[in-house]
Image (spheres, rainbow, N blue to C red):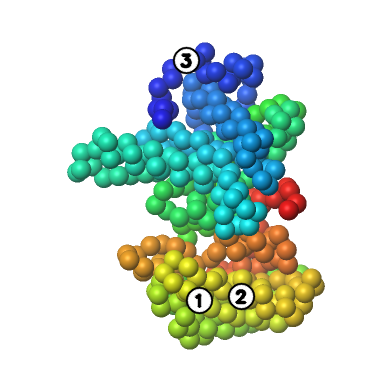
Amino acid sequence: MSNFFNSKNVDDLNLIKKFNIDVSDIEVVSSKNLCLNHIEKALIIEKTLEAYEFAKINLKCGNITKRGFASNVCTNDGIWALGTNFNNTRNEISSVCGERSAILAAYNLSLLSYMQNANLNDCFDFKVKYICMSQALDLSKIEKATVPCEDCLSWFNTSRYFSNDTVVFSFERNNQKLCIKAVFLDEFLPYRNILTSNKFCSDKKIIYSVLAKKSADEKNIDNSMILNLVKLTYKSYLNNNLSALSNQNISCSIFANEKIYTLNKIDWTKRWFSEPLFACIFNATTENQDKTCVDAICYFGDEISKNDGAFNDGVVSIKGLGRIRQKYANDNTLLILNYNDNIFVTTIGEYLPMKFIQGYKI
Ligand SMILES: [Zn+2]
């Protein structure tokens, strides 16, 4: 455990020395206003290098997918923790990315610190401030900044441990020079705090983003089709009795290969459920196989689950969108959201502007 502000001298930072990095020479590239002083910048570089070394050693020693990622996470309290990707099998159930691994490590350290030091009247407030990500790719070969996968973004989309000010750092090459790219969480997840409604009336105005309008025109999807999708999804939501355990009812429709598929969230137990988007896709792919093409997705449901307390768990599955964007859907696929005052049509590409590239075959 170390405090972010403990180190006051760049000369104390071993990896910057080892890699012979001149901190002044490394640009921090951000599309937002991010003010880091010299020592803070040096620490971010050092912590990203730590993640880089950790990713490399994990790739060499333990990682069965032969892809190495690691992260160094800093909490608002200045606790740092490293974590690397862990693949117990090559199936998703037992794979944890470096970012989530580091977040868990930081959480554990933060909780331990609280347990050992806290006045019981203090509230435990774990929030992630920085995530310094790295892949195991040689520094001289790094071109693009690393983008967290949509499973990790599903974690970041929640509000308890993350905020829009959480920043993700990773190395990138800019004009042939190594730099640090800084991306704020709301750049990955611009819809993060915008809640949909579970109320429906058919005279709500339909509003399109510019890109969604263009995509809808290309796909010959008009207002009546959008409204029809919302109505069918709403009807399915009303008739779904399969999500009583979580008290979070969600329905989803897709328009694929000129046909509408509508299905509901199913709770298996508390905490285990099946996503309606996947159910729709399974039906569509059963009929259309590799020719499956998803033109639009409509979600309707409860943002909040009431499972031993009320939690904002979200209606739209970022994990689900991430998977189907790899196949059968793309950035131009429409995403229809039922808001309080209108029905809003956006695209997957706008909802999740940065796409994770898998980069390996298994
Ligand atoms: Zn991930």
Q: Residue at x 62, y 40 (%)?
A: 62
Cα–Cα span, label 3 and label 2:
55 Å
**Disc 3 or 2, which lies upstream in sequence?**
3
Residue identified by numbered label 2:
279
Which one is in front in this view, the residue at disc 1 or the one at disc 3? 1
Q: Residue at x 32, y 36 (%)?
A: 113
Viewer-side residue, 52 vs 319: 52
The amino acid type, in three-letter code, at marker 3 is Asn
Q: Residue furthest top?
A: 11
Helix, strand or loop for disc 1: strand
Tell me: is circle 3 under 8 Å from ligand 1.
no
- Determine whether, in the image, residue 61 is placed left or right of residue 37: right
- Give x and y (percent) for residue 343: 54, 72
Badge 2 amino acid? Ala
Which label number is shown at residue 266? 1
Percent across and percent down for residue 46 are: 55, 25
* Real-space CA distance between mark 2 and mark 1, rounded to the nearest whole angstrom: 10 Å
Question: CB under 8 Å between callouts 3 and 2?
Answer: no
260 or 357: nearer the viewer: 357
Label 2, ligand 1: CB separation under 8 Å:
no
Q: Secondary structure at mark 2?
A: helix
Residue 178's disc number: none
Query: Circles 2 and 1: CB distance less than 8 Å?
Result: yes
Quadrant of the image occupied by residue 277: bottom right
Name the spot of residue 163 as percent of width and height, x first: 44, 47
Q: Nearer the viewer, mark 3 or mark 2?
A: 2
Q: Is residue 120 visible?
A: yes
The circle on residue 9 is 3
Q: Quadrant of the N terminus?
A: top left
Residue 217 in view (yes/no):
no
Of pointers 1 and 3, the one earlier in the residue sequence: 3
Q: Position of residue 122 (x, y in %)?
A: 23, 42
